[in-house]
Image (spheres, rainbow, N blue to C red):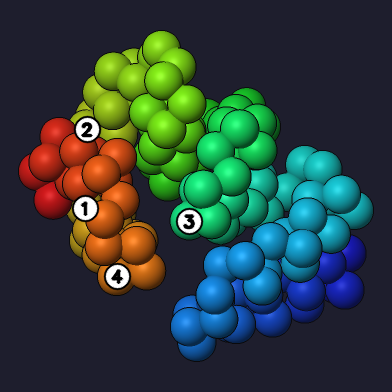
């Protein structure tokens, strides 16, 4: 990824963190992932935004790509779990167990994932799949 892609990613993340609605950011992350198809963080963010906008089939595709690119990233695993739940697909347990193990190995992940879940529930208070994951992970 070149510096212009880094800059676009940073700008899009900044806009998200400032409260811009997810639907306004999907296009930015589609551009990022189209131009840098191996940008795992871009795919992870795109899946999250798609989930927030109830684009569940698109989110399932994006989350699968993110996990394929970086199988060690707990957030991409959570996104894939959310997409699996939203689409009624199988495979949820495997990803939850991975995240639980990762949190044991790297305790700092708990804080990061807790903040992510809080952000998701702030943006979508009725997100039942995210509430399940929060419960399963004890966050």
Mark 3 Cα shell of 10 Å, populated few (<14), some (14-19), many (≥20): some
Local SS, label 3: helix
Image marks 1 and 4: residues in contact by CB distance under 8 Å? no
Q: Identify the mark nearer the N-term, 3 or 1.
A: 3
Q: Identify the mark nearer the N-term, 1 or 4.
A: 1
**Location of residue 47 with respect to 14 vertically, above or below:** above
Mark 4 Cα shell of 10 Å, populated few (<14), some (14-19), many (≥20): few
**Location of residue 38 with respect to 127 vertically, above or below:** above
The CA distance from mark 2 to mark 3 is 23 Å
Relative side of 126 to 84, left or right: left
Tag shown at residue 52: 3
Image marks 2 and 3: residues in contact by CB distance under 8 Å? no
Tag shown at residue 122: 4
Task: State which mark lies toward you, 4 or 2.
Answer: 4
Residue 133 spot, x, y in % from top left: 23, 39
| Residue plotted at (54% across, 56% down) | 53
Q: Which residue is mark 1?
A: 110
Task: State which mark lies toward you, 2 or 3.
Answer: 3
Local SS, label 2: helix
Q: Identify the mark nearer the N-term, 2 or 3.
A: 3
| Residue plotted at (66% across, 47% down) | 43
| Residue plotted at (54% across, 75% down) | 21
Instruction: Quadrant for the N terminus, please.
Output: bottom right
Q: Is residue 106 visible?
A: no
Local SS, label 4: helix
Splitting the image into 4 quarters, where does residue 14 fall? Answer: bottom right
Residue 117 spot, x, y in % from top left: 29, 57
């Amino acid at each position: 990824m070149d510096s212009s892609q880094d800059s676009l990613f940073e700008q899009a993340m900044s806009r998200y963190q400032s409260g811009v609605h997810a639907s306004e950011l999907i296009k930015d992350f589609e551009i990022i992932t189209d131009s840098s198809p191996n940008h795992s963080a871009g795919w992870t963010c795109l899946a999250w935004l798609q989930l927030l906008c109830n684009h569940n089939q698109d989110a399932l595709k994006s989350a699968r790509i993110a996990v394929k690119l970086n199988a060690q990233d707990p957030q991409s695993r959570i996104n894939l779990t959310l997409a699996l739940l939203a689409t009624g697909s199988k495979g949820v347990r495997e990803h939850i167990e991975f995240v639980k193990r990762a949190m044991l190995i790297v305790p700092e992940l708990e804080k990061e994932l807790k903040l992510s879940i809080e952000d998701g529930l702030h943006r979508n208070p009725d997100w039942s799949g995210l509430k399940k994951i929060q419960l399963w992970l004890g966050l």
